[in-house]
Amino acid sequence: MSEPMLQVAGLRAGYAEATVIRGLDLAVGAGEVVVLIGPNGHGKTTLLRAISGIIRPAAGQVLLGGKDVTGWPAERIATGGLVHVPQGDGLFAEMTVEENLLMGAFPRSSWRSRRKELAGVYERFPVVAARAAQRGRTLSGGERRLVALGRALMRPSRIMLIDEPSLGLAPVAIDTVYEAIAELKASGATIVLVEENFTHIGGIADAVHVLETGTIVASGPYAELASDPAIVQTYLGSL
Ligand SMILES: Nc1ncnc2c1ncn2[C@@H]1O[C@H](COP(=O)(O)OP(=O)(O)OP(=O)(O)O)[C@@H](O)[C@H]1O
Ligand SMILES: [Mg+2]
């Protein structure tokens, strides 16, 4: 196998109060969509934060494109090609959609390249283009999620970490968000996706890992995990 785009080895991370991620290994190949699934509060978000440098790992390694970025500050890891789409959407309520999108551009990018990235996002997500001048707070939940994805596309990246894009959305909005993610996959994006259940990931997951109490307790192709009654029952609720 060629070098993984992302490799995590023996990772430990958490907060002052507690270690949350307890010795976790993960490899993501270029062009793969890897889904992390697991119950509330077991460390999915914390893992993404530790990978992207928002919190500093206590032990272990994070390699991005084969380069050891462990302990690097988040902005440096971002410059290395990692984009993190956090849980929720983090839009600025009083800024327009376009202004929110521009917040995703590299701070030192030229206006010419910003315009180009904007045009790319609008082409990819016509719903977002139609809302360009609207303020963040006036959007529907699904539209906000699409803007958050669009903002992540404002800079070229090698890997995207996407945290629970379906959270709190109505079913029809979830479908729209997952269509957008399927399109990212089709265009060759490398993605680590966090979800709480199996419902939406069937068409896009190359591999699924179950994260419980800060470590990966089961891994396999989607079809394999989704047909294992013990896994479905214990970790994932009903399909
Ligand atoms: N900023 C923080 N400071 C201290 N503890 C935190 C912080 N953020 C999360 N935790 C704790 O870390 C543990 C893991 O939380 P995390 O948000 O990673 O879980 P999760 O799997 O993403 O859950 P969810 O599905 O609800 O998003 C929880 O016990 C949580 O209370
Ligand atoms: Mg979370």
Image (spheres, grey):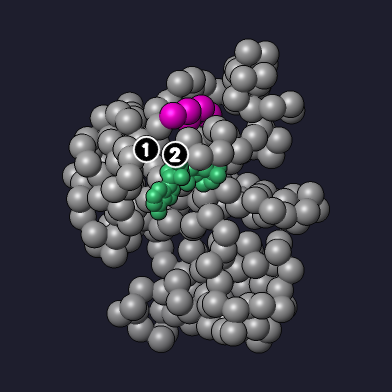
Q: Nearer the viewer, residue 237 or 144?
A: 237
**232 and 42: which one is in front?**
42
Identify residue for label 2: 43
Q: Is residue 223 above or below residue 40?
A: above
Image-based side of 88 in relation to 47, left or right? right
Which residue is the extreme one toward the front?
A: 17
Q: Position of residue 68 (x, y in %)?
A: 19, 44
User: Does any atom of ligand 1 lie closer than 8 Å to the CB of label 2?
Assistant: yes
Residue at mark 1: 20
The answer to whether mark 1 is within 8 Å of ligand 1 is yes
From the viewer's side, name the closer residue of 222 and 229.
Answer: 229
Identify which residue is drawn at 70% across, 64% down.
141
Quarter of image, res 6: top left
Residues in magenta? 208-213
Tell me: residue 171, above or below residue 90: above
Does the image show residue 205?
yes
Q: Earlier in the sequence, mark 1 or mark 2?
A: 1
